Image: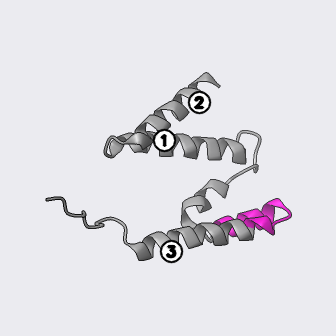
Amino acid sequence: MWHALPLRYFTLQTLATGIETIFVGLAMLGKCDDFEQVRQVADTFQNYRSLFDGVGQGASDFTLEDKFFKHEVKINTLVFMRQFTFASFYSWIKLKVTLSK
């Protein structure tokens, strides 16, 4: 007899909170006019705070686009550390595309 598996990792409340955070962040970004305002919005989110550190302060520093690209590659690489799912195929394709650039 099949029983529904319990939600171990996500509860409905944490999932709803995560989705709400995305919409609030996008609304805040939609009101930004310059780079400093975008930086202030990113400071409220811990995952993206480090991406803005040291951007454009010197000639040898990474641009913001380079840092986001590096962060995306890191996320796609970490997918392979988890269970093999359709996300692994998506990440594999995204990594192949980055290799062709």
Q: Nearer the viewer, residue 80 or 74?
A: 80
Q: Nearer the viewer, residue 15 or 25?
A: 15
Horizontally, residue 92 falls left or right of residue 48, namely left
The answer to whether 91 is drawn above or below residue 7 in the figure is: above
Majority secondary structure of the magenta segment? helix
- Counting from the top left corner in percent of width and height, residue 2 is at 18, 59
The answer to whether 13 is drawn above or below residue 84 in the figure is: below
Q: Which residue position holds label 3?
A: 17
Kindly tell me whether residue 53 is visible in this rendering. no
> Mark 3 or mark 2, which is nearer the start of the sequence?
3
- Counting from the top left corner in percent of width and height, residue 44 is at 62, 71
User: Which quarter of the rendered picture does the N terminus lie within?
Assistant: bottom left
Q: Nearer the viewer, residue 27 or 6?
A: 6
- Examine the image and state in which quarter residue 69 appears: top right
Magenta residue span: 29-42
Q: Which residue position holds label 2?
A: 98
As drawn, which residue projects farthest toward the right?
33
Kindly tell me whether residue 9 is visible in this rendering. yes
Q: Residue at x 55, y 66 (%)?
A: 46
Q: Residue at x 57, y 73 (%)?
A: 20
